[in-house]
Image: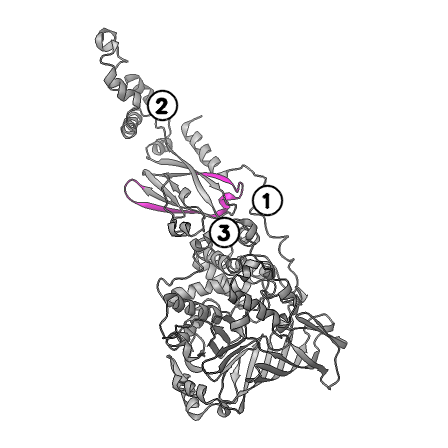
Amino acid sequence: MGIIKRLLIVLFCSNMAFAQNTNENKFKQLKEELATPNVFRNAAGAPGPSYYQQQADYKMNIVLDDAKQRIDGKETITYTNNSPDPLSYLWLQLDQNIRIPGSDGQLTNTSTIDDFSSSWALNRAMNVANFDGGFKIQKVTNADGSELKYTIVGTMMRIDLKKALVNGASFSFNVDWWYNINNRMEIGGRSGYEYFAEEDNYLYTIAQYFPRMCVYNDVEGWQNKQFLGRGEFALPFGDYSVSITVPEDHVVASTGVLTNESKVLTKKQLNRLAEAKKSDQPVFIVTQDEAEEAEKKKSTGTKTWNFEAENVRDFAFASSRKFIWDAQSVQLETKSVMAMSFYPKEGNPLWERYSTRVIAQTLKTFSKHTFDYPYPVAISVHANSIGMEYPMICFNGGRPNADGTYSERTKYGMHSVIIHEVGHNYFPMIINSDERQWTWMDEGLNTFLQFVTEQEWQRNYPSRRGPAHLIVDYMKGDKSNISPIMTNSESIWQFGNNAYGKPATALNILRETILGRELFDYAFKVYANRWKFKHPTPADFFRTMEDASGVDLDWFWRGWFYTNDHVDMSIENMQWFRLDTHDPEKEKAQDKEFSKEAGAGISSIRNKESIKETVNEKDPSLNDLYIISDPYAVTPEEKAAYQKFSEGLSQKDKDLLASGYEFYQLDFKNKGGLVMPIILEFAFEDGTKELIKIPAEIWRFDSENVSKVFYFKKKVVAVQMDPFLETADCEVFDNYWPRQAVPSRFDIFQQNK
């Protein structure tokens, strides 16, 4: 068998790597894991021809009692059944019931005595346990005023209908309730109040304050899983008409459009608002001086603010006499919207300088990657130590020191939380995933675009999540404390990394390394537009990204979302080969050159000194033509043999032997279990470099060990795998050949401590 044929066999075998291992195939399709496509959701990840969703419309009258810190409410809900199923009962969420002493949420929170090792922690726990929270349902009535039977089950309420609600029918009913507002600074919470003792004032950020309809759909039926504190909210879309009565010197920020602005704003404020609608820079509607004046006077009367919102899944508001208010217009590709900020003087100078401008950039970046923001306004409200989102409005932290100074951490923390919470308008407020089941579908996708926005906001912005190398420490940690991303929201270990960091990183890797920006951005935009104002599932996202990109990504979803494997690939070995030309002059010249590079062996070095004279040196008559002074000289026999060999070669074989290719076999090992592309940077003797990207499918026949041969017309001096840290490889020291020392920090002060 000729040398060319033998070499080709080596090349093909190294590429195929047929060895099978006993582990589950990393490239197995996600047939069993994903729901079977049907008329509601098709195999491409789009809504099917029979897709439906329910409608819940609300009319509410809300009273904020500033003296008692209490909410009183009356609502009329009109629920339309668009499903094919007759419904004999309706389910509503009573999220404030998590604050009833002895609720499931409180009882199932684990604790040790170490958790109460400070007076702050102990007081907080006792305040939570003793707070009289939860909805006080006063009555539930039919449209005609007759009572409806209802049953409260923890954080849920079932209303029994006198006759089933059939497809296409609507049902209206009334609920009256009240509850005590929680002090966020003492017991925490997504909503509540902050008390300013120095001036005896309150700042209210109010949400989950009314009984809200659960989602009923083709996937879950009724989504009535209990609220334990983590899994947020699954809600249907609807239209809202809400009247909010507050102290007459309060300023209210809310979901929706203010419909009675001439009755609640002064003429000066109306003029400023009109100016802001034309300005691409923030304009003050209420100045700091005016807010400080309101803080001192404290009016005793009340005023009612009316808001309306179309096609939203929720409704929140904020109210305080402390609010400074600024606003500007934001021009998107197809429309302009208003960006607004409401904040107390304690937020300045950070908030007046940055908040509204950050909102504007967030709307521009998110719109570019999804669709133009469809609502008329986006609002950021400053509330200390919070970050929470609702349609058109969000509550954000980031408070300077009392003297107005602030740290770098406070500044960028404030920027990031505003970007993140404003971004939630898209995920899940419009692309309405089920947060009670899958936190990552809103937090992870939103955190990914948060990273993109941060980088567009400022060059080298210190983003905490997104780049692959930032997730490494988490992914290589103790697996008993790491959940797969596809874990229910209430059961996740390490919530932040699991629901925010890892899925955001996975999407960034998908964009930068697996698909490339063009394919990813197109597919992501298709998903956003398919599912805006609808209820997508993980399967819809996975299928759409594959369908629109044309790339099979089941291996990626399986590894990153269904396992807690990590990325740890290594270059185990590299072997250097050259074609044997059979030309003795070339081969011996190369051998001679290599011997110089390799150096003489230890025996040769020592023999040169210890053996003063060999036998044939003493008696030259022992020498014949085979004893020559140069071991690399070519003999006549070798020349004759090469001449005979050369005459039997075709011209193609001669050209290949004369090509000067250098061959390198690299052996790779997958130590972490998560298959990923192999990205290699070859450094050559002439100082040049070449980048080669090998798709993850190289691991499809053996997910633990693969080999591949590379060939170049120049000498390789070094190889580095994942040179741009784009695969989240957890150990980089074995990504080099030859091996290189990679420094790690150790903290002697921490050790001493």
Q: Is residue 266 above or below residue 728?
A: below
- Classify mark 1: residues with Cα within 10 Å, few (<14), some (14-19) or many (20+): few
**Mark 3 is on which residue type?**
Met
Q: Nearer the viewer, residue 105 or 361?
A: 105
Name the mark on residue 24. Answer: 1
Name the mark on residue 475. Answer: 3
The mark lying in front, picked from 2 and 1, is 1
Q: Is residue 731 above or below residue 225?
A: above
Name the mark on residue 645. Answer: 2
In three-dimensional space, the C-alpha distance between marks 2 and 1, rounded to whole angstroms, equals 50 Å
* Disc on the earlier residue, 2 or 3: 3
Which segment is the magenta one? 684-708
Q: Where is the N terminus found, in terms of image quarters?
A: top left
In three-dimensional space, the C-alpha distance between marks 2 and 3, rounded to whole angstroms, equals 57 Å
In three-dimensional space, the C-alpha distance between marks 1 and 3, rounded to whole angstroms, equals 20 Å
Q: Nearer the viewer, residue 298 or 441?
A: 298
